[in-house]
């Protein structure tokens, strides 16, 4: 019994350490120790768009979007509401509806 369990454990360990024949490339690459990138290969240069003309275009687009948004009547702030007045109005509507039935 113990021999069978040991043999099964050995078989599972052998299966787990090898990639299946139809495994995708990304899976088999992870099994290889040299597949991870080296920190020395990470680029240290930063590519940033600092061209003034680029930022002027971005600003112009943003201002145009702001004008379009503010030109929409739905962008107006909602009128201030009094919760008590809303509650009274809702109760009146409910009472009127109940009275018609």
Image (cartoon, rainbow, N blue to C red):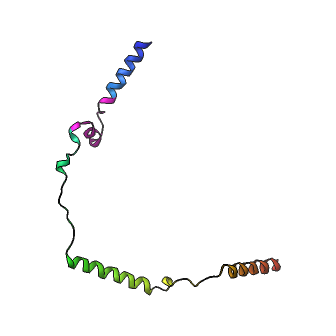
Measuring from the top left, give residue 20's x and y in whole percent.
Answer: 31, 33
Is residue 35 positioned above or below 97 on the image? above
What quarter of the picture does the N terminus occupy? Answer: top left
Residue 71 location, quadrant: bottom left
Count of numbered tags = 0
Of the pair 44 and 12, the residue shown nearer to us: 44
Is residue 73 positioned above or below 45 on the image? below
Is residue 37 positioned above or below 58 on the image? above
* Residue at figure coordinates x 25%, y 40% from the top left: 29
Of the pair 55 and 2, the residue shown nearer to us: 55
Of the pair 62 and 84, the residue shown nearer to us: 84
Task: Let me know if residue 93 is in the magenta part.
Answer: no
Measuring from the top left, give residue 77's x and y in whole percent.
Answer: 52, 83
Task: Let me know if residue 19 is in the magenta part.
Answer: yes
* Residue at figure coordinates x 78%, y 81% from the top left: 96
* Residue at figure coordinates x 30%, y 29% from the top left: 17
Measuring from the top left, give residue 2's x and y in whole percent.
Answer: 43, 13
Measuring from the top left, give residue 16's x and y in whole percent.
Answer: 34, 29
Residue 92 location, quadrant: bottom right
What quarter of the picture does the C terminus occupy? Answer: bottom right
Magenta-colored span = 16-33
């Amino acid at each position: 019994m113990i021999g069978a369990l040991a043999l099964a454990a050995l078989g599972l360990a052998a299966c787990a350490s090898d990639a299946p024949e139809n495994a995708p490339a990304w899976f088999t690459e992870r099994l290889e120790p040299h597949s991870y990138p080296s920190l020395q290969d990470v680029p240290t240069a930063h590519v940033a768009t600092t061209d003034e003309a680029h930022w002027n275009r971005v600003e112009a687009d943003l201002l145009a979007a702001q004008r379009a948004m503010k030109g929409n009547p739905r962008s107006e702030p909602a009128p201030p509401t009094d919760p008590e007045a809303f509650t009274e109005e809702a109760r009146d509507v409910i009472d009127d509806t109940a009275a018609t039935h």
